[in-house]
Image: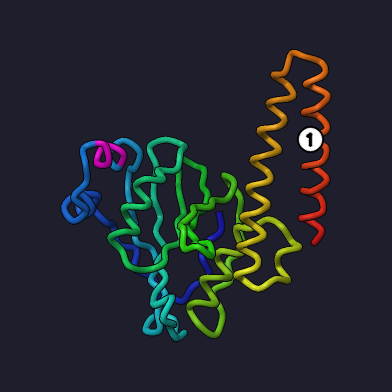
Amino acid sequence: MQEFQLPLSSLVNRFVAKSKFYEKGGLSSRQQNEFVDKIQKITWKYKLSKDTIGIPKTDSVVEIQIFEIELKEKRIPKNSLLIIERLIPYKILYRFIYKTEFCYGIHYQDNDSHTHLITSDWNQDLNFNFSSLTLQAIWESLVRSFIPYKNLEVLSYEDAIINFREIQKMSREIERLEKKVLQERQFNRQVEWNQVLREKRLEWDRLLKE
């Protein structure tokens, strides 16, 4: 696990009590239980702003926070993250720790303003770039760090997100078709599903090469 290459002026390293989210979030018992049962500790590690790293904000990205979340189980508490982001009006990069393992997570918005969580693999180091002309450019670079398809690097941020969503959608469709082929007991139907699966895989290959 690599340390973030950030100036000391941006280091916060402050423990955030889970009760802060209970008090301000008006959480249900189920939501409180997820915080208690799945999260061990929340630490506000870094604050990236014009004051701390000298890079100007934009209307879209005023600050970027980095939170480290120690987990009680090896599962990302997605609902709790949404609550955290509802109460903290800034962009957040997460590092999750479970025992000796780690992974990273980030929320991004698609072109319809829907929010999606994307995470790295466990114990996968990502190359984050914290140098750019604006905080928005840094944020877009952070999101791109989670996208594994090299062909998307040449696209604008907006187009890369569109293509990434399409690739994800097609990946889910291929997984669904693979299950259908395995579960189908009638030979003729299995042949039909296999043909559909082959076409989807060809479409997948074309999309990755665009």
In the figure, is residue 50 to the left or right of 32?
right
Residue that sits furthest to the top in the current view: 185
In the rendered image, residue 111, in percent from the top left (x then y), is placed at 53, 65
Q: Label 1 neighbourhood size at 10 Å, few (<14), some (14-19), many (20+)?
A: some
Q: Which residues are magenta?
A: 30-34
Measuring 50% from the left and 62% from the top, which residue is drawn there?
Answer: 112
In the rendered image, residue 185, in percent from the top left (x then y), is placed at 74, 13
Name the quadrant containing residue 15: bottom left
**Residue type pointed to by label 1:** Val
In the figure, is residue 157 to the left or right of 99?
right
Q: Nearer the viewer, residue 111 or 59?
A: 111
Residue that sits furthest to the left in the current view: 23
Q: Nearer the viewer, residue 42 or 2?
A: 42
Measuring 56% from the left and 59% from the top, which residue is drawn there?
Answer: 2
Q: In this figure, which colouring scheme has been used for the structure?
A: rainbow
Q: Is residue 3 above or below residue 9?
A: above
Q: Is residue 180 above or below residue 9?
A: above
Q: Nearer the viewer, residue 33 or 210?
A: 210
Measuring 35% from the left and 38% from the top, which residue is drawn there?
Answer: 38
Query: SS for tag 1?
Result: helix
In the rendered image, residue 137, in percent from the top left (x then y), is placed at 54, 77
